[in-house]
Amino acid sequence: MTHPFLDLAPLSAARFASVEDRVARLLDTRQDVVITQGEALLPLEGAIRGTAGPGTTALNVITGPYGQTFGDWLRDCGATVIDLAVPFHTAVTAAQIREAFAAHPEIGFVSLVHAEAATGNTNPVAEIGEVVKEHGALFYLDAVASVGAEPVLPDAWGVDLCVIGAQKAMGGPAGVSAVSVSERAWAVMAANPGAPRRSYLSLLDWKQRWIDGGRTVLPHAPAQLEMLGLEACVARIEAEGLDTVMARHASAAAATRAGALALGGGLTPYVREARDAAPVATTLRTPPGVPASELVARALAADPALPLAAGGGALAGEMIRVNHYGAEATPGAVRGALVALGAALAERGADVDVLGALRAAENSWK
């Protein structure tokens, strides 16, 4: 008896290349796009280890936990790292990037997360890219959470290494990712003696064995299920229209924020300014003395499928995350999250207005 998920024919090189081409169109890029066979941490780490080394001075922007991870990798490569950390409830600005260059003109590498799903903020990459371009630094961007939820334009923004993943706004599987690589980034890797070679982390291996050979022979057997999943979610975005998908995410964010403000009960937006809030997830601060993890547990007891989570680590005590991305970027998901949070707060004796929250969310959906 055959099974559609088990009895899969081998994926051809031509089909693999066609998926890469569709991802490139999604990013509106003429750069090389490499689909990597693993979760997005694989190309995120591979891109840093390929381009950074003892001679690198890196500006590492920290607006959430992933920025902290990138700084660790850069230091491990031997780079000199200048951390620019901003409070997680806000976003970094182009002016702050410009000030960092003025103080450290030797900066030759900038690492940035576009949208931090973990903290609910998003950074103005287009404006930052202009500053980075003026100073000629290599620009590395984590767009894993933002792709599909807001514009991601490596060429227009001067991004040399742009990593995306399928598992957030694209609505695909977690086990496949991609990176667009500029000619300049390839040249830096080729000149870097510390760049991984003959390694699963090596982007250079993909270039030499796949791209330079005309993408006719795959270096190894691809993960068929994940590749088919990526192909399917790109096809779904193409059918719906990228602008429509992004508008749906923006509407979900606006509706969740408005609904939470109207709900009351002491919930407030964690990201203070709406312009800094990511369309992929809305983070909320719980009232004093109300642990976020406990409130989320109460809400999920009514419906375990709701897109709710407590913040990670220390943030579990004060932050709730409404993950309205992919299939959850819908009015129904937003309504369900607001009703469940209202009920959980009411159980603790808080004064909430669930109907008012639902009206506010509906009026904010564009």
Image (cartoon, rainbow, N blue to C red):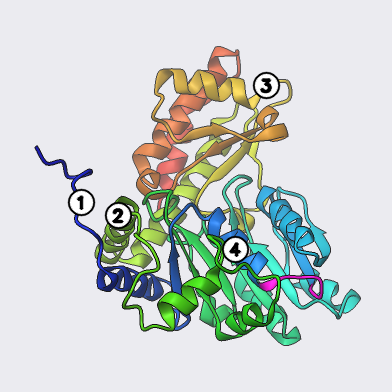
Residue name at image x 78 percent, y 68 percent: 59
Picture coordinates of residue 298, whole percent (x, y): 52, 18
**Residue labelled with disc 1:** 8
Separation of marks 2 and 4 at Cα, in angstroms: 22 Å
Separation of marks 3 and 1 at Cα, in angstroms: 49 Å
Q: Main secondary structure of the magenta part?
A: loop
Where disc 1 sits, the SS reads: loop
- Mark 3 / mark 1, whichever is N-terminal: 1
- Mark 2 / mark 4, whichever is N-terminal: 4
Picture coordinates of residue 333, whole percent (x, y): 38, 38
Specify whether 76 is left or right of 121: right
- Tell me whether circle 1 and circle 2 mark residues in contact (CB < 8 Å): yes
Single out the residue that lies furthest toward the front: 198
Where 161 sits versus 143, above or below?
Answer: below
Q: Which mark is residue 224?
A: 2
Task: Give, as a three-letter code, the residue at label 1.
Answer: Leu
Task: Give, as a three-letter code, the residue at label 3.
Answer: Val
Residue name at image x 64 percent, y 35 percent: 312
Q: Quadrant of the C terminus?
A: bottom left
